[in-house]
Amino acid sequence: MRWGPLLVLTAIVLMLASAMVSPVRYVPPPRLTLDSNLGDFTEELEEHNVTEPYLCEPAERVIVTCHVHSDWELNRTITALDRFPHFSIELTDGYGETDVVVFNRSEFYSALPNTCHPWGNIELKPVNLDRNRLRKELEAYRELENLVGDPTEREFIHNRTVELEELLEPDQKELMCNATFARIILVYPVKTKSNVPLMAALWAGVVLTGVIELVMVWKERES
């Protein structure tokens, strides 16, 4: 059997494969979903009159950006945020936002890892309640109240219904929270990894195939 044509074909395949491989490959950041932990800080929130964190307007707003470049930095940042009451967090395509309820800014800033940078206060502007959304939510809770049989869930739904009814009263003023809300902007850029070792292996295969073919041709001539 003549191995020459097979070696030539192998070399061509290796060269084509090496030409098709990009010098770098892109690794997308992980997708992360983290539930709110406000329920773990109920007493502390009530002490600062933050009984309705989803509906109230904070006394101050600050912005904090967190740029992470590895899973270890991401986990470290999430661990730091979990020390404070926060809303749900969802990281999609390397970007996510959430609000953290802060009672002591110096304590909060000192707990942040070096991946996070505070940028100071955000100018507060009057925010009007979305009454259409609240009305739809109220109607949904009223319907749900008649369907739920569990006493605990029924009580929660009833209390939520009462809160929404109060918010929709014509003279209802916006609730104010005695706390600072820190808007956390989490950024995890796409990572790049080198394909140079793979390209080097493919080209080494091309060279090795060429050497083997030369040795075979030399042996044929000697014989």
Image (cartoon, rainbow, N blue to C red):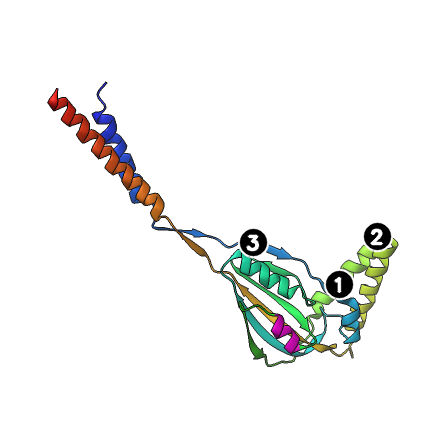
Picture coordinates of residue 11, whole percent (x, y)? 25, 34
- Which picture quadrant has residue 136? bottom right
Q: Is residue 40 above or below residue 44?
A: above
Q: Residue 63 colored magenta?
A: no
Query: Which residue does the image show at 11% across and 22% down from the upper left?
Result: 222
Q: Residues within 10 Å of mark 1 (few under 14, many from 20)?
A: few
Which amino acid, by three-letter code, is at mark 3?
Arg
**In the image: residue 107, left or right of residue 201:** right
Instruction: Give the residue pinned by disc 2.
Output: 148
For mark 3, give the secondary structure.
Answer: loop
Mark closest to the chain's N terminus, 1 or 2: 1
Query: Which residue does the image show at 71% across and 62% down from the upper left?
Result: 37
Q: Nearer the viewer, residue 166 or 34?
A: 34
Q: Residues within 10 Å of mark 3 (few under 14, many from 20)?
A: few
Picture coordinates of residue 85, whole percent (x, y)? 70, 67
Q: Is residue 51 visible?
A: no
**In the image: residue 30, left or right of residue 61:** left
For mark 2, give the secondary structure.
Answer: loop
Instruction: Give the residue pinned by disc 3.
Output: 31
Q: Which residues are magenta?
A: 105-111
Q: Residue 109 colored magenta?
A: yes
